[in-house]
Each structure stands twice: as C-alpha cells, then as structure tokens.
Image (spheres, coloured by chain):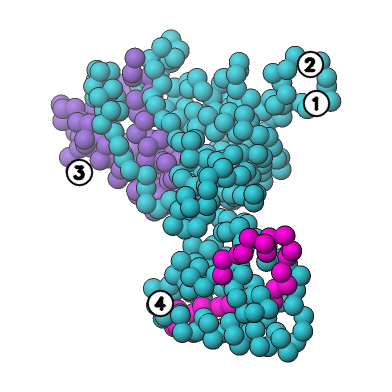
Chain colours: A cyan, B purple
Amino acid sequence: MTTIQRKYSLPNCMLVLEGLSDRPNDSQSLDGRPVLTILTYVECQLIQAKQTLTGGRDFFESLVTAVSGYAQEFLSHVTHPEAHNKESGLVQLQKIDRDRHRLIVQPESHKEPVENHTEGTTQEVELTTVQLFDLVEAIDQFFADTQTLPDLTLQLAPVSRRYVRSGQQLVKQAVPATVGASGLALAAIAFFLIPIPEAVRRPTEPTSPSAQSSNIANAPPITDPVQLVQLQQKLTDQLRPAWKPNVALGQDLVYRVGVAADGAIKGYVATNDVANGQVQQTPLPRLLSQPVASSATTPESLAQFQVTFTPKGEVQVQPWEGK
Amino acid sequence: LWRMRCTNPLRRSHARRDLSLLEAKALVVIAADLARRLTAIVRQLLLTYQQMHDKQIPLEQNLRLSNYLERFRSHFRSRMNPRRSGVLAYNSPEKLDELALTLLQKLLFCTGTAGMQRLWISLFDGEVE
C-alpha cells in the first residue's frame, strides 16, 4: 500500500495530508489520483507565523470545523458556535481585534485525564486576516478536492437565532433585514444550490500520480552508457509517433520517465503541476507497462530520462540529470 | 440589475421594495465573481494596510490605499442618506475608513474557492430558527 500525500499550498499556509486508500485501484478517477480515504497525518504550516500544527484525524476534523465556522463568523459578525467549541473541539478561534485572530490548539491527548506535562501543551498562533484567509482557502481547496477524504465535505449552514447574543447588532445584515421573515430565509437555503465554482484549483501532488511511478526514484539505475543510448533511442521511437501537436497546451510538458532494460516504460513522474494535470494528454499512460506480480519483490534496474512534449508535436528525450 | 441597488434602505434614492431572494443571490454571485477577478489587488491592499498598521504609519502615505479609502468615502457620502441611523454611525472619516477596510477584508473571503457559498450563507446568520 502506498502512502498518498496531498498538499494545498497558499502564500501563508501549507496544508499537507498523508494517508492511505482503502479502495481498489479501479475506483481511481480519470486523472489517475487514488482516493485518500484513511488519514494518518496532517501538517498545517502557518508560514508567516512560523508555526506548524500537526495531528491526526481528530485534530484535522476539529481544525476544518472551527476554521470554517470562524470564517462565517468573520463574514456575518454573528458568533458561530463551531468556532468556539471548548468541550469537544481541539481547535478554537478567537478574535483579538479587527485584524488579528488567535488560533488555539489543544494537544490531542487532552481528552485523557492524565496529569502529564510532557505530552504536549496548548499551542496558540496569532494570525492576521490575510493569513486567516489563506488557512480558510487551503481548507476550502481540500473540501473541493473529491479525491481526498470524500467523507468530509463543506457543511455551511446559517447560525440559528438562538446563538445570537442579546444586544448583538444585526443592522449590518442588510439582506435578511429586507428579505424579512426567517421562514423565508429557510426556504432560501433549501433552494440554494450554487455549484462549486469551476475555477477550483487542483491541489499540487508532491508524490507521484500512481503507485508504479513512485518506485522509479528508488530503483537501481542502469549505468551502462551503450545500453543507455539504445534505451534513449527506443523510448524516443515509442513516444514520437504517439504524440500529436497540441497548440492549446501553451507550454512544454516535462516528465521523468523510468525505462526497464527491455525498453518498457515502467513509471513516470510529472515535474510540475501542469504536466501532472495534462498527463492524460500524453501517450505515457497508454504506454505504461503493467507490472508483473513477481516484479514487486525484486526492484528492477531502470534507466531514467527526462521527456519533454512540446505543443508543436516534438518529443525530446534526454538522460535524467536528477535533482 | 442597476436598479436593485435602490432596495437598500440606507441609500438616498431608496425604492420602497424588498430585494427578492433571486435578486439577492444574483448580487452575491456577481460580487463573488468580481472579487475573484480582483484577488491580487484586494490582497495587496490588505497586506499594505497590515504593514502600515503594524508600523503605525498613516495610511495616507500609500497612494493606492489612500486612493481606495478616498473613493470609498466619497461614494458612501454621495449615495447614502445621512438622516438614516445606520448611516449616521459612519459620520467621521475614521469610521468610514474602518468600514472600507472591513468590507475589503470580507471581499477577500469572497475570492476563495467557496467564497460565494460562504457569503450567501453568512447573510442568513442569526436569521433562522
């Protein structure tokens, strides 16, 4: 079983999820990314604040609920109960002033009644509004990603009237004030179905798109220069007739490709996001040789090449220089 | 679409009618879409504001930020009815600047992946049973 890593990256916040898939490979989506269903580790780097929060599923669920609730509170100025869940939540958010917000994270072992100070302390992070937004956006991009924890989805619902503190000003709620009766508002929510915007950015995939390809970096290299030249020619001959010009692409697609001693393509890794997203446009998935069951035990020697597909229809194959 | 603005009871030219749900929703969609196109500018203005605020430099010293605040103030004053109590609360330039920045921050949240949903749902906070 391969560890799957998903990364949602914004200027001030990087959310990294690691986990496994308990679904068979045939349920993979069109883009070839397996579904991450079991979450094992979460890392949330708040870059400007120079703090990193880590945890497991409990922490992550608490984080997304609290942050999402607080984002709604920020927009409406109505206290959102999910942002201040002291009893069950590990994560809470508080407003310091208009531009500053405090994120409080309890250690995950907090629930156990053990008096032990070494097991972790409460973390507090101060965020500016822009930093808070980046955290919200990283989480919203995770929610929009159907291939990562599909059981967690964005649940937005208006705060009930009973949570409104007495004396809290509702003058700012211009629309409901004119829309009127709350029964109407309920109806509005029922018929509200704005589709998820099309411009959803796909998260970057720091690991390889498929299980086979993840092994190519670790495979023992083929070093014989004569064999390398032959394999380079063989790979070029395989790819060149299969690649058609595609002007719509706009830029080169570059992959790291692993080739076995017999010339079969054993794996490939996109070198950037665009190449990762457009991999189905290239002949690589079709030409990938399926691993034989026994080959998993002994790693095969591979020759590695850098393959560039240009929009004009050219294929360049060069020895992989490595990073 | 343009005339929908007049359903705002705080405006000088106020048409005595309520915004329908469909109209409100349309305005939310338009606002979120425009906000998304302006993501870079909104972000830049807020980052500049934060830096100047932290260093306690007057906001007027940044040309872009002071342009925005100035335009906001003049638009607000020319369009909103000062006899309304909701408008009266913003009777000083400082309070108007504060409103302008608060709205700019909210606009940033509208630029996000789920910004449209978040804005729409937030409008009903505290209004349902």
Residue closest to the far top: A166
Q: Amino acid at mark 2?
A: Val
Quick check: B84 left or right of A35? left
Q: Which residue occupies 48% across, 53% down?
A: A26
The chain containing the residue under callout 1 comes to A
The chain containing the residue under callout 4 comes to A
* Residue A119: mark in rendering: 1
Local packing at callout 4 (Cα closer than 10 Å; few below 14, some 14-19, many 20+) is some
Label 4 with label 3: CB-CB less than 8 Å: no
* Residues tagged by mark 4 and mark 3 found on one chain of the structure: no
- Mark 2 and mark 4 lie on one chain; the one further toward the N terminus is 2
**Which residue, given by chain and number where applicable, does mark 2 sit on?**
A114
Label 2 with label 4: CB-CB less than 8 Å: no
**Which residue, given by chain and number where applicable, does mark 3 sit on?**
B2
Inter-mark Cα distance, 2 to 4: 63 Å
Q: Is residue A97 in sight in this rendering?
A: no
**Which residue, given by chain and number where applicable, does mark 4 sit on?**
A246
Q: Is residue A226 in sight in this rendering?
A: yes
Residue B91 on image: x %, y %: 39, 28
* Residue A79: mark in rendering: none
Residue A264 on image: x %, y %: 60, 76
Label 2 with label 3: CB-CB less than 8 Å: no
Inter-mark Cα distance, 4 to 1: 56 Å
Q: Amino acid at mark 4?
A: Asn
Q: Quadrant of residue B75?
A: top left
Q: Secondary structure at mark 1?
A: helix
Residue A224 on image: x %, y %: 77, 84
